């Protein structure tokens, strides 16, 4: 498996269950995505913001184009345990076709409290004021957990896809 990390620039990846290949749910029907960030600019970077549209049927990618998800999982939570101070925000606003993640971020109604696991459409993670990502930084910064609804846990749905991506 080839995993390219640029020699200069910022790096980000989203992997399922700690791997970079497609991942599969287990009998617990939970999906865990790990966010990994890196700084290879040679300079410290002032903070970061991650915006993730929660997968849903007929969803959109970070450029506002169709992403092709075939099952709508239920948002279960974000964990940010670790040394990086991160604030988490939630939105129930549905991304619109043609709208980039940056455009969505500027108009979404972000809350510091979770309105509902079933209506959450996006998550934003922001490093707290004053945080600097040092040159050479590379680590997991958060984990997103989703649950497969019971109605989709059947043999008819075994080959269906749940796509995910994020904006950094």
Image: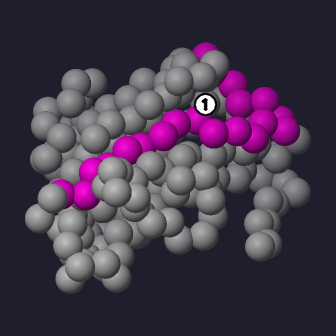
Circle 1 residue: 47
Residue 20 against residue 107 in the figure, above or below: below
Identify the element where label 1 is drawn: loop
Q: Which residues are magenta?
A: 130-149
Is 73 placed left or right of 168 in the picture? left
Is 166 placed left or right of 8 in the picture? left
The quarter in which the N terminus is drawn is: bottom right
148 and 57: which one is in front? 148
Q: Is residue 146 magenta?
A: yes
Residue 68 is at least partly visible in this image: no
Image location of residue 79, percent across then percent down: 44, 31
Residue at position x 14%, y 33% from top? 115
108 and 33: which one is in front? 33
Residue 127 against residue 16 in the figure, above or below: above
The way the protein has been coloured in the rendering is one colour
Residue at position x 66%, y 30% from top? 46
84 and 63: which one is in front? 84
Is 166 placed left or right of 156 in the picture? right
Image location of residue 22, percent across then percent down: 53, 71
Residue 71 against residue 18 in the figure, above or below: below
Is 50 placed left or right of 65 in the picture? right
Image location of residue 154, percent across then percent down: 20, 73
Number of on-image labels: 1
Residue at position x 45%, y 66% from top? 24
Residue at position x 20%, y 45% from top? 120
Image location of residue 131, percent across then percent down: 63, 21
Local crowd at mark 1 within 10 Å, few (<14), some, or many (≥20)?
some
Q: Is residue 31 magenta?
A: no
107 and 7: which one is in front? 7
Our reading of the magenta stretch's main secondary structure is: strand
Residue 159 is at least partly visible in this image: yes
């Amino acid at each position: 498996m080839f995993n390219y990390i640029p020699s200069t620039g910022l790096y980000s990846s989203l992997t399922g269950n700690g791997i970079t290949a497609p991942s599969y749910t287990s009998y617990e029907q939970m999906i865990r995505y790990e966010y990994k960030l890196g700084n290879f600019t040679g300079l410290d970077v002032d903070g970061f913001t991650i915006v993730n549209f929660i997968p849903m049927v007929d969803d959109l990618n970070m450029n506002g184009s169709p992403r092709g998800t075939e099952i709508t999982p239920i948002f279960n939570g974000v964990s940010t345990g670790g040394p990086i101070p991160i604030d988490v925000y939630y939105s129930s606003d549905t991304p619109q076709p043609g709208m980039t993640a940056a455009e969505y971020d500027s108009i979404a109604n972000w809350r510091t409290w979770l309105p509902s696991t079933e209506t959450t459409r996006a998550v934003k993670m922001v490093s707290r004021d004053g945080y600097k990502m040092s040159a050479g930084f590379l680590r997991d910064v958060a984990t997103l957990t989703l649950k497969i609804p019971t109605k989709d846990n059947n043999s008819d749905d075994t080959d269906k896809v749940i796509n995910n991506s994020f904006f950094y």
